[in-house]
Image: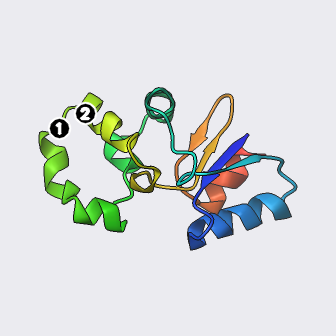
Amino acid sequence: MEFICYPKCTTCQKAKKWLDENGKSYEMRDIKENKPTLAELKKWYKMSGLPLKKFFNTSGLLYKSMELKEKLKDMTEEEQLKLLATDGMLVKRPIIVTDSSILDVFRENDYEETLK
């Protein structure tokens, strides 16, 4: 299992604490230092079944400074995925990736159900 996070993020810290307290083994990946590739993002998007907008860190400074709230409407999915791949700070986190599932944010109930 891969745990993709930004270590300074409080939500990521809560998710890490939950994983540790529940004895889950994982490989931790700093999303800022080792950003997701375009191929990874495409795979995760397809696995998740979620709208692509859910992958954007809409509360992040970079998202806001780039005025993406308005710009995303006019972009294709491919353009949005390519944009996400340019900077890990655009991607909502934490992300848990297993062989069969992806969790896109920390919700304790989802973690308990998916990572039994």
Three-letter amino acid code of the residue under disc 2? Glu
Residue that appears at 34% across and 40% down:
52
Can residue 95 be seen by looking at this rendering? yes
**Residue 86: quadrant of the picture:** top left
**Circle 2 crowding by C-alpha within 10 Å: few under 14, some 14–19, many from 20:** few
Residue that appears at 15% across and 49% down:
71
Query: Nearest the camera: 54 or 27?
Result: 27
Left or right: 11, with 39 as reference point? right
Task: Return the residue at label 2.
Answer: 79
Which quadrant of the figure contains the N terminus? top right
Q: How many marks?
A: 2
Residue that appears at 43% across and 51% down:
91
Can residue 59 be seen by looking at this rendering? no
Residue that appears at 67% across and 53% down:
111
Mark drawn on residue 3: none
Indicate whether 17 appears above or below 49: below
Q: Residue 28, image x and y in percent?
A: 71, 50
Q: CA distance from mark 1 to mark 2?
A: 6 Å
Q: Residue 110, image x and y in percent?
A: 62, 52
Three-letter amino acid code of the residue under disc 1? Met
Left or right: 9, with 92 as reference point? right
Query: Nearest the camera: 91 or 37?
Result: 37
**Residue 46: quadrant of the picture:** top left
- How does the figure colour the protein chain or chains? rainbow
Query: Nearest the camera: 48 or 1?
Result: 1
Left or right: 57, with 7 as reference point? left
Q: Residue 116, image x and y in percent?
A: 78, 46
> Residue lying furthest right in this view?
23
Evaluate if marks 1 and 2 touch, with contact meaning CB atoms under 8 Å apart. yes
SS label for mark 1: loop
Task: Return the residue at label 1.
Answer: 75
